[in-house]
Image (cartoon, rainbow, N blue to C red):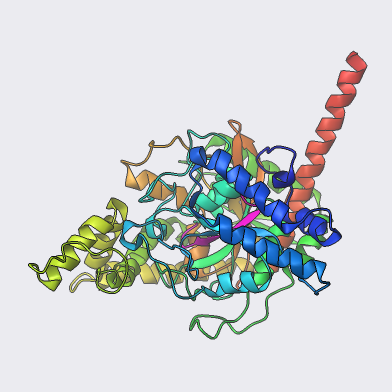
Amino acid sequence: MSTPVTDDLTSLDAAELGRRLAAGGTSSVELTQAYLDRIAAEDGVLGAYLHVAGEAALARAGEVDAARAAGEELGPLAGLPVALKDVFVTEGVPTTSGSRILEGWHPPYDATVAARLKAAGTVLLGKTNMDEFAMGSSTENSAYRPTRNPWDPDRIPGGSSGGSSAAVAGGLAPWALGTDTGGSIRQPAAVTGLVGHKPTYGSVSRYGLIAFSSSLDQAGPMARTVLDAAVLHEVIGGHDRCDSTSIDAPVPLLVKAAQEGARGELAGLRVGVVRELGGDGHSDGYDAGVLDRVRETVELLAGMGADVREVSCPAFDLALPAYYLIAPSEASSNLARFEGMRFGLRVGDDGSRSLEEVMSLTREQGFGPEVKRRIILGTYALSAGYYDAYYGQAQKVRTLITRDFTTAFDDVDVLVSPTSPTVAWPIGARVDDPLAMYAADLCTLPASLAGLPAISVPCGLSEGLPVGFQVMAPALADDRCYRVAAAVEAALDAARGSRLLDELANRGAAA
């Protein structure tokens, strides 16, 4: 399922575009120009991009076309446009992390994932909008402008990767990269009708990813289909010597898993429905329509031969408070580097002020309200006398959550739940209520805290807006996520096709 878009190149998924490029049905320049034209026409409303690299993109596309015409052997992604969340550093291309404190900064190097996409021959369309330093669930915390949901421009596109989700859902990019700290790929994918995957922590390099919370941040794909997400993931994944947290393990066969899942081969798969994530007695704060779509999707899995059972993970109820102690604590340390001395914004340096005054003025003007809130919260939690009571206790809860996952995976192969408790809410509805905003991550936080892979796949509509279905798997079993998500996608596509045929038949009979 994807947002309805016009019947042109920008309406096609990346796999189909790749086939057309390889067969000569279109050129990379033609395709890139189609996206640039659409961005120019529609991004004034959506606000998906912070920087559009138009001239550079067309020049890059021309290079790929010339190489193809010369008979050079090219990879499957060669000539395909891509968008990157503005948290990935890109050589010579403005990178702000959605913050005024980095306004005008042009990095001298590429993040590893950006370099791998470049090596694969992709064309960078631009850098997408985001909540400042990835802190938020609605992309209203961007220092530059909010991003809007293509399904309804009066609603949020999720966050913090809302620019990437709006770009793909709105037809302004065929696919994109986001980052997920507590759900910032999966939640925006859910509320915009996309597929979004958070890989196993350490399986995709964090080198060149501007850090929010180092033990949680993870890059991953956002796409219109499960297969597209798997293709993009395989390209960016794998060990990186530049990242000390990178896992030295091969990338699973994600494309193969997606292809197998699309055939509905789920016989014997053990699926656990998490009671604490929207189950009986735990439905407060969840939209009824969201829970209905998730239950229907679970029934689809059972119909494909999966062994479905309920699973209890009691520590999941503590994920929200644990996360909002751990992540701000790490942020208070990571963001200390932004002091106005080495790069980015500098305020008050007129020769009359001390170093400390310049740093204070720079941070006051450069950081937004949500970033300041989390820095203050994290600094307090790490302060003498409170470390053990807050940060230390949160890390113990993290261990309990990991143990709950371990116990559950002794009995089942994957866990499932809603991705977001609600559909996209109106812009401005939660900006003055941080706790309500934080609650958007209820379902995604456990997998983030445990470092496990999780994917969101569209599973229908509620109130005319997309609902996401989350699949979680053990560490390094990302292929299971893709297999189950592809099965859900194929089953729902078949069901929609059947309903359409029935509707057409009824119309014919009536005529």
**Picture coordinates of residue 188 (x, y %)?**
53, 49
Q: Residue at x 59, y 67 (%)?
A: 199
Q: Is 458 placed left or right of 335 in the picture?
A: right
Task: Name the image quarter holding residue 339.
Answer: bottom left
The reply to whether residue 141 is in sight is yes
**Picture coordinates of residue 447 (x, y %)?**
53, 63
Q: Residue at x 84, y 35 (%)?
A: 498
Quarter of the picture holding the C terminus: top right
Q: Is residue 118 above or below residue 98?
A: below
Q: Is 139 placed left or right of 257 in the picture?
A: left
Q: Is residue 443 magenta?
A: no
**Picture coordinates of residue 379 (x, y %)?**
24, 67
The reply to whether residue 481 is in sight is no
Q: Is residue 175 magenta?
A: yes
Q: Residue at x 84, y 58 (%)?
A: 24
Q: Is residue 32 above or below residue 465?
A: below
